[in-house]
Image (tube, rainbow, N blue to C red):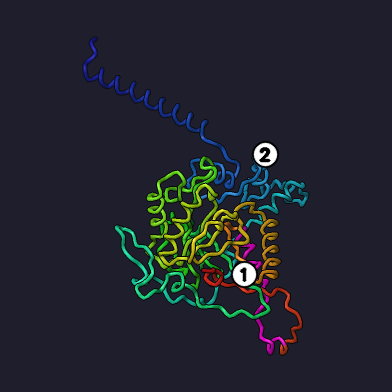
Amino acid sequence: MAISVKQKFKAIGVILSVLLIIAVVVWLAAEKSTEPQFENKVDKLLFDTDNKSPKYIITLPDKTRRDFVEKNADNNEEKADKPSKAYKGDLSEEDIRLRELVNNTPNLSKLKDIVNPLPLKYIETDSALSMAEGEMTLPKISEDGRKPWIEYAAPAKTVQPNFSRIAVVVKNLGLDRRTTRTVVTKFPGEISLSFSPYGNENKELIAEARRHGHETYVDMYLSSRDFLRSDTGPVAMSMTSSQDENKQRLKKTVSSSSAIGGVVVNPGVADENNRSRLQELFSEIRNMGLLLIDATGENGVQEVPTAGLPRQKADIVINSDFTPENIRRSFLQAELLSQSKGMVVIAVEPKPVVLMELSHWINTFSPQYTYEEMKEKNITAIEKPFALIPLSEVVVE
């Protein structure tokens, strides 16, 4: 008996449906077999590459990372009935070391906000101290001779005669908003702040810093000594570019439409071979009415003569070896130097461990009591006679 066309199509439809069902089953089985398996929620957060949740990374040795996470995971329901050595208190030396590492990880949120900070006179730029050049707004000396580094400075701080003065600048700010705001709000106004020209929100952050009493500056980058490992970016002063190009880079560096008092020179190539090139750039900085802080940690920049440029060299520069021991050693060195010189300048990077150690250190400084107050409080000795001052008080023209 002949099969009708309608029956043929019906048979074909059934066959296609069966094939489709088989294909779906095979695909689901393949997906299940290739999907990564995680023993707990913490593992999934840390090791699932498809997980889009933000990750706060602590680098632990690969060999022990998974074991450590498993032993210390919170809400690990699967292991609740199977207590490990960690829960029994029988920790290995490696477990103890790793737990201490996590517990000692700097937590900037623990720092307290500064109460009732005193804002500076100028939060934004003074039109008389700036000029337009194309799309840039550059600092300048006003028609009546006022200079940005003086006008944008904090009021002079009174320091007791028996106290040594310490100026601290935190540089390379503006690249991370959260860290920058932490420094702005949780450190006293006497701490000066320097912003990277590569920051996207510098105008807003600089204004907030000045509302909290901080003097504000901008970082000046030199050519990296090893550009393959450390690229200082498109506005770094290049010793292979033309001098006109370097002057344009300098202008882009200081063109922030914000109240900045000068530049903080970061480490880089600054030797006798390019001394004349740097001298021209430093003259440009002087002619804009800005000061210069040499935070290179070397002598090259300081050896560039520039008459009339307000400048100072940082005595202590914390650019590397960000271990608590090294940082504390640097601060101790600063104490000794300030007692012998009467003043010391420190430049630091905004690394969490540096900021935590800095906060702890400056909070050990003794209050500046008057003679009458010391007599009233029966104070016979001053343990830490150090006073914080802004950068504007350490420069020499």
Amino acid beneath label 1: Ile
Query: Which is more foreground, mark 1 or mark 2?
Result: 1
- Compared with residue 277, is residue 39 higher up or lower down, i.e. above or below? above
Q: Tell whether 323 sits left or right of 347.
A: right
For the stretch drawn in magenta, the main secondary structure is: helix
Q: Tell whether 259 sits left or right of 324.
A: left
Q: State how far apart marks 1 and 2 are (Cα).
A: 44 Å
Relative image position of residue 16 (x, y in whole percent): 33, 23
Relative image position of residue 396 (x, y in whole percent): 54, 69
Count residues near mark 2 (Cα–Cα under 10 Å), then give few for <14, some for 14-19, many for 20+.
few
Which label belongs to residue 90?
Answer: none
N-terminal-most mark, 1 or 2: 2
Q: Foreground residue, 17 or 187?
A: 187
Q: Residue at x 38, y 67 (%)?
A: 140
- Compared with residue 155, is residue 261 higher up or lower down, i.e. above or below? above
Q: Foreground residue, 103 or 387?
A: 387
Reading the image, the residue beneath label 2 is 63
Q: What residue span does the magenta drawing correspond to?
A: 353-374
* SS at badge 2: helix
Amino acid beneath label 2: Lys
- Compared with residue 368, is residue 246 higher up or lower down, i.e. above or below? above
Which label belongs to residue 166?
Answer: 1
